[in-house]
Amino acid sequence: MGKILLVDDDKDMLTLSSMWLKKTGHEVVSVTSGKEALDYLKTDKPDLIILDYAMPEMDGPAVFKAITADDETKNIPVLFRTGMDDDVLSDLAPAGIVSKSEGKQALMTAVSGILG
């Protein structure tokens, strides 16, 4: 199983998603902001980043652009987990997009599809 960086400003969503992922054997690191995510990536490299779209200060697309612009992190797959319309994110070409409303099964399927 892989190491996953979970980025979401909603602490309840972080707790629930982290629990689901840990139950399937993943190591999970949770942060509540884009800045915290970028700070974490300076010292450690996960196998997957699950990134919320709408966050205060630095939204998901801004974090995604910073990740993909950095040679050290640009090859880490990013899965957006969001309530936003897929069309908004398709231009960014993330590894995947999962709606928060789709729940546990959709998230786990997307993670399995990326990490194998």
Image (cartoon, helix red, strand yellow):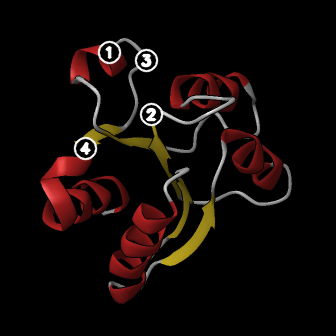
**Cα–Cα gap, marks 1 and 3:** 8 Å
Percent x, y for residue 83? Answer: 28, 36
Please state if 91 lies on the left or on the right of 46 as rendered. Answer: left
Percent x, y for residue 66? Answer: 69, 26
Which residue in the protein does label 1 denote?
88
Q: Nearer the viewer, mark 1 or mark 3?
A: 1
- Identify the mark nearer the N-term, 2 or 4: 2
- Identify the mark nearer the N-term, 4 or 1: 1
What crowding class fits label 4: few (fewer than 14 Cα within 10 Å), some (14-19), or many (20 or more)?
Answer: many
Q: Is residue 12 above or below residue 74?
A: below
Which residue in the protein does label 2 denote?
53
- Identify the mark nearer the N-term, 3 or 4: 3
Which residue is at 70% across, 22% downward?
69
Specify the amino acid type for callout 2: Tyr
Q: Quadrant of residue 99?
A: top left
**Cα–Cα gap, marks 4 and 1:** 13 Å
User: Closer to the camera, 11 or 96?
Assistant: 11
Which residue in the protein does label 4 denote?
98
Which residue in the protein does label 3 denote?
92
Specify the amino acid type for callout 1: Val
- Identify the mark nearer the N-term, 2 or 3: 2
